[in-house]
Amino acid sequence: MKESVIRPENNQVINLTTQYAWSGCQLVTENSVRFLSCASGRSFRSVRERWWYVALSKCGGDGLELEYEMILTNGKSFWTRHFSADEFGILETDITFLLIFILILIISCYFGYLLKGRQLLHTTYKMFMMAAGVEVLSLMFFCIYWGQYASDGIGNSSLKILAKLLFSVSFLIFLLMLILLGKGFTVTRGRISHTGSIKLSVYMTLYTITHVVLFIYEAEFFDQAQVLYTYESPAGYGLIALQFVAYIWFCYAILITLKQFPEKQPFYVPFFAAYTLWFFAVPVTALIANFGIPKWAREKIVNGIQLGIHLYAHAVFLIMTRPSAANKNFPYHVRTSQIGIVEEAAASGAKFPHHVYGNVTFISDSVPNFTELFSIPQSTGSSTSNPRKQMEETSSADHNLTPSCVVTTSEFSGAPVLLKPSPAGSDSQPPPYQLHAPQLHQHNGYTEYFSMHTTGARTV
């Protein structure tokens, strides 16, 4: 920042006396007290952004008693009049991103409606919708604050604090959702272990406390006369460190999940690649803002970058989880109504069984997938040792008179067992249909959940 001595010939020095015509001063007497009342204005033109300082001095005498009110403006436009040069464009940027996030929220609610109809609206997707909704509220309060500031040059500081709090809440919800998805929650498991829940609680509590400390530090120690970035403080550096810890945890969780469920690579590989950029974007932006962006342009640039990072995170997740048959990245395959049954049947009580990829449930948006009506989660034990029956038959008063509808599952490790018809001339009559155990077709990897074959004509 360059400094220079003021020059009287450039009208940079104003004498507050009645002899100086441009000062607008006149002598006023009230209650036998004489004082000068000055009212005037000055305009300055500059080809680039500059810092302007106002200094008041009295040469000689016994001190100075002064009451003053100054209104500093930048032009006459609504979008610039009360804004400093480093705040130009913030209101327009916030309005633009507010409209975009409203669109994202509407689309996510529509996708949520479709997922709910297919019983695939899991907790993690609800967290995503909540994060988008809180983001919309945050931007709405920011727009109200900056709009009021553009009108009177003062604004409501409470609205700005509320908007910042909601912005942080949206960030924390989204961060928690990413860690949960990395651990496989609602994708490969129905719940997090007790130890994992404690770790998550401790981490998110620490992250929240650090955010609160950051707000307090900003309110108490930041100089209003300086342009300071939010992360330019000890608490800000602490948040950057916690962001790196979250990324390490995120990587480890995805590695373990893919090791146990390699069939989920179509979702987790692009998921990891996309959000690796997101995890690094936040601290890198903070470092660049602190050391690489000039102070006179920092606030408006950082505001746009932060909103762009949030938009990137929400847009990527919205695209990756769209309920479409063409979406090869769709993560969910267990319906919400099956989670309790699957957890009870699973050996560990926490992880879902291995399954073909989730987008097979979206064969058509208009035609239901009837194969899902006959699917039952596979158990890990053998058919002889498992206390649960792997074959369930509908009740019938007489099995010889009414053929039964059978729903079966089978382990792939053993050879399929075929039910052979009774030999000719036997006393017991064979049923008109024979049931074959479900088999895995090698060409598509899908399980045949339901199969019936006729046995031929019977002797009358």
Image (cartoon, rainbow, N blue to C red):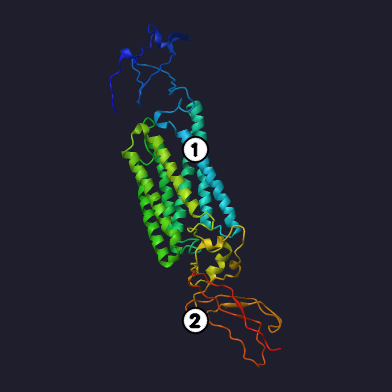
With respect to residue 250, does 133 lie above or below?
Answer: above
- Percent position (x, y) of residue 324? 54, 56
- Please report the residue visible at 44 percent of the width from the left and 56 percent of the height from the top: 179
Q: Residue at x 45, y 65 (%)?
A: 263
Q: Can residue 293 be seen from the camera position used here?
A: yes
Q: Earlier in the sequence, mark 2 or mark 1?
A: 1
Q: Quadrant of the C terminus?
A: bottom right
- Per the model, the C-alpha gap separating discs 2 and 1 is 61 Å
Which mark is on residue 415? 2
Instruction: Give the class, few, some or many, for how many residues have Cα within 10 Å of label 2's Cα (few <14, many ≥20).
Output: few
Q: Residue at x 48, y 80 (%)?
A: 414
Q: In which image quadrant can residue 394 be found?
A: bottom right
- Nearest the eye: 198 or 437: 437
From the image, tell me which residue sits under label 1. 96
Of residues 338 and 224, the one nearer the viewer is: 338
Which quadrant would residue 44 be assigned to in this image? top left
